[in-house]
Image: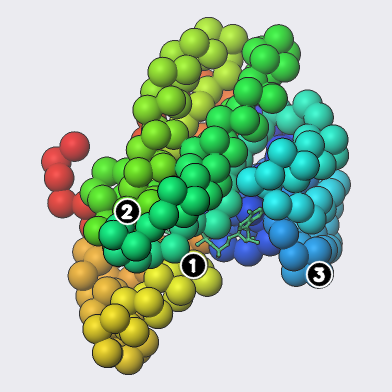
Amino acid sequence: MDLGIAGKHALVCGASKGLGRGCAEALAAEGVHVTIVARTASELEATAQEIRQKYGVTVTAVACDITTPAGRAQALAACPNPDILVTNAGGPPPGDFRKWSRDDWIAAIDANMLTPIELIKATVDGMMSRRFGRIVNITSSAVKAPIDILGLSNGARAGLTGFVAGIARKTVAQNVTINNLLPGQFDTDRLKKTLGSAASTTGKSMDEVFEARRLQIPAQRFGDPAEFGAVCAFLCSVHAGYMTGQNVLLDGGNYPGTF
Ligand code: NAD
């Protein structure tokens, strides 16, 4: 299927590796020029070079912390009028809510709620005036089924989800859609960190924890970031213009509910 987005420009955050990179690659494979953002310049530039070589699109790398006003200004200066915005940043650390301070909460809300909202605010009106825009927020399956040790993530992402539900209906008449993609367990560095922390609290080995988790997933495997990217690219396609305000769960069947 031709997704109809060749030649468009995308700003993809948190994209040197993992799910953000999966999205950037899937968009580049469709001929989209991508501006990719991450904090570590060397890793980001290596990813940019690989995407350029593989797909022949323009890839601009912006090394910054997207959760800061200065970082967002840098990213938006490099890609001032994106047709596609993929918001993403590292998730908050796991832990016991009794130990989280106000500063811990503010950091989580900044990264996983206010940063996407600020990026949407900076880009959505331009998209609406150009009559095309696709915004995809990478959130988490924890929005649908909270994970106890990830309380900071559960709380901050629920806030973003509520906000998106309100505005996604205000933009779609101008062909600007806003949707959230909810990863279950994907094989990325973030998953290794989360499972590492589960291993240290239970005293089990990493291998044991990985295997037990894998077997709990109906698909019997962790997700591949390329699969995540493919769904993101579809949401960004011309074919998905009638789909807005949705929370799309990609979890290998892990969520047990009917809806
Ligand atoms: P990852 O650690 O593999 O990659 C994160 C990417 O974001 C990297 O490129 C990193 O450099 C970049 N990044 C992180 N913080 C940043 C910042 N402040 N500014 C700019 N770039 C930043 O993580 P991932 O697994 O791809 O996860 C992406 C998001 O999805 C995270 O918020 C994570 O909590 C969430 N998530 C992941 C899973 C999973 O199974 N992997 C499950 C649920 C939710």
Residue topped by disc 3: 42
* 222 in relation to 59, above or below: below
The image quarter containing residue 77 is: top right
Residue 128, x across and y down, in percent: 65, 13
Give the image quadrant in which the ligand numbered 1 is located: bottom right
Identify the secondary structure beneath mark 3.
helix
In front: 164, or 234? 164
Residue topped by disc 1: 190
Q: Viewer-nearest of labels 2 and 1?
A: 2
Identify the secondary structure beneath mark 1.
helix
Q: Is residue 29 visible?
A: no
The image quarter containing residue 252 is: bottom left
Q: Is residue 169 left or right of residue 32?
A: left
Q: Residues at badges 3 and 1 in contact (C-beta under 8 Å)?
A: no
Residue topped by disc 2: 151
- The residue at 39%/51% (across/down) is 153
User: How would you rate the neighbour count of disc 2 (Cα within 10 Å): few for under 14, some for 14-19, many for 20 or more?
Assistant: many
Q: Give how far apart the Cα atoms at labels 2 and 3 are.
A: 32 Å
Say what amino acid the circle numbered 3 marks.
Ser
